[in-house]
Image (cartoon, rainbow, N blue to C red):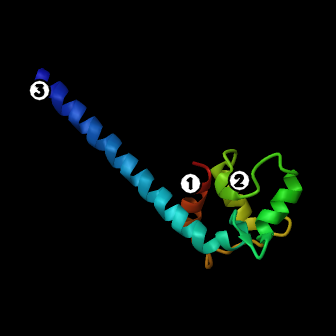
Amino acid sequence: MKSLKLILCSLAFVMVSGSLFAADDQLADGKEQFEYWCATCHSPNLYRGNYLPGTASLLEKYNGQVPAALEQRTDLVAEYVKVVIRHGSEGMPSFRKTEISDSQMEDIAAYLSR
């Protein structure tokens, strides 16, 4: 009986740690995809003394109530991020599946909603 419990506990540990590693991989991939596709407009860094277009737009839209840089937000939900990627929002263009694949979009959404 003890050996069965030990086996079940070991199996549960392997399953949980495997999914944690997968989640870490998705977040790392999401950060990489964000930097490639999104950071050119949504970086928190100043460029020539000004915020980048996406960050500046969000700063004005939210009047400082939430961080303008997407990576600094804590209120983003993955489903919302995916809708904005596919359909755009105000000044942000939409991205087709031939530009940002579903897998890349899932990774970006997971990264921003972490």
- The residue that mark 1 highlights is 110
Residue 22 shows in this picture: yes
Please state if 90 lies on the left or on the right of 112 as rendered.
Answer: right
For residue 110, which quarter of the picture?
Answer: bottom right
Residue 48, x across and y down, in percent: 77, 76
Judged from the image, the secondary structure of the residue bearing numbered disc 3 is helix
- The residue that mark 3 highlights is 3
Q: Residues within 10 Å of mark 1 (few under 14, many from 20)?
A: many
Q: Residues within 10 Å of mark 2 (few under 14, many from 20)?
A: few
- The residue that mark 2 highlights is 80
In this view, 96 is above or below 86: below
Q: Amino acid at mark 1?
A: Ala
Mark 3 → mark 1, Cα distance in angstroms: 38 Å
Mark 1 → mark 2, Cα distance in angstroms: 11 Å
Mark 2 → mark 3, Cα distance in angstroms: 46 Å
Residue 103 shows in this picture: no
For residue 55, which quarter of the picture?
Answer: bottom right
Residue shown at 56% from the left, 56% from the top: 111
- Quick one: label 3 or label 1, which is nearer the N terminus? 3
Residue shown at 33% from the left, 44% from the top: 17
Q: Amino acid at mark 3?
A: Ser
